Amino acid sequence: MTPDQFERSLKSGRPAPVILLHGPEPHQRQRVENLVKSLVSEGMEDFNFLVLQADETPAAEVAAQAQTLPFMTPPRVMLVRGVDRYPADQQDVLKQYISHPNDSTLLVLIADKPDWRLKFFKWVKDQGIDVACDPPSGRELAGWVREAMAKRGMTMGAEAARTLIDRVGTDLADLEMELEKVYLYALGRPEALPEDVMAVSRRAPTANVFELGDAAAGQDPTRALAALKDLTTTDAPLMILAMLVRHFRLLLKAKLIQLERTPRSEMARILGVPPFVQDKYLDQARDLSLAQIKKGLAGLKQANLTLVTSPAPPELVLGELVLGLATLRRSDRIGL
């Protein structure tokens, strides 16, 4: 099950007496650990909450501790970290306990990298008691952002969620921290807007590249030049150029998709981007003509040649390029 499913199961009653917590996403794992700790009665943590390390605690001792009755009010919660480091004979001891657990104890077995080829982990998975903490991706990530804001009592639309991901990146801990800032900034209103995200969220270094492409394609020269200024302090000129080339090639694909009236269900596959990202490229392509996008790609090709062969300062070359990309519509209107 996922952490969300596990949280919902807590609302409908006590969880299974044993769960296996695994997966690479630390924020989600910490969230589950906090959820199970919250089951311990207030003031009883010193008596009914125990954390053990597998490499310091034999499985037989874990089982014995789990059989101990809680002090005053159940449940007793135990976390055992690193159970994937137990050898097979120790895992067999755990299996025996899981087959006949103490219902007043919640035993959380935490595995960094469970080997699903091993009998023990296959058996645990078959019991349906594992909680997988995998990082959400694509549409799931945007949904996670919106749900995290909803838990604060405020709504967030798809565009605002996408803006936050573009600026902050995909790390859940970073997103959670920036969500709190956006929430506090928009406090008193029912919905957090993209402008709120832009006003207070910090930009991760990797996110600046996407912001540069979005600002240039969105014909916002002030924002594009600001993003470029941030990027040139940390990233190589050719890397920045490569990301802009990728962005405008995706715009070209998106424009051709629109002109060919491709079914929406096929768009993300053709673009090669997650469904929640496709709308961004489609919107940007809709606001530019095919000729303007091709003109942008020609400018990128020329900038690449200049960077490789000319002694001109890279900052100057990229500045002129970005200004040209971010004013494609304006240049057409005045005949440049």
Image (cartoon, rainbow, N blue to C red):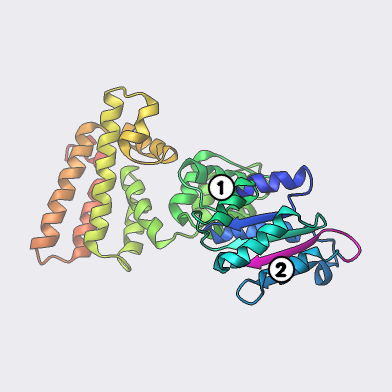
Q: What residue type is labelled 2?
A: Val
Of badges 2 and 1, the one in the foreground is 2
Foreground pick, 193 / 22 = 22
Residue 15 at x, y percent in the picture: 74, 49
Q: What residue type is labelled 1?
A: Val
Q: Is the C-beta separation of discs 2 and 1 under 8 Å?
A: no
Segment tinted magenta in the rendering: 71-81
Residue 22 at x, y percent in the picture: 57, 57
Q: In the rendered view, tell whether residue 282 sits above or below residue 327.
A: above
Q: Is residue 45 magenta?
A: no
Left or right of 85: which side holds 229?
left
Residue 317, numbered circle? none
Residue 156 at x, y percent in the picture: 58, 42
Q: Which residue is outermost to the left? A: 309
- Disc 2 to disc 1, how far (Cα)? 37 Å
Question: Within 10 angstroms of label 2, few (less than 14), some, or many (20 or more) residues?
Answer: many
**Mark 2 — residue?**
62
Q: Which residue is drawn at 34% across and 52% down?
A: 212
Foreground pick, 273 / 182 = 273
The mark tally for this picture is 2
Residue 56 at x, y percent in the picture: 64, 77
Q: Is residue 230 visible from the viewing direction of this image?
A: yes
- Residue 192 falls in which quadrant of the image? top right
Q: Is residue 334 visible from the viewing direction of this image?
A: no
**Mark 1 — residue?**
145
- Residue 31 falls in which quadrant of the image? bottom right
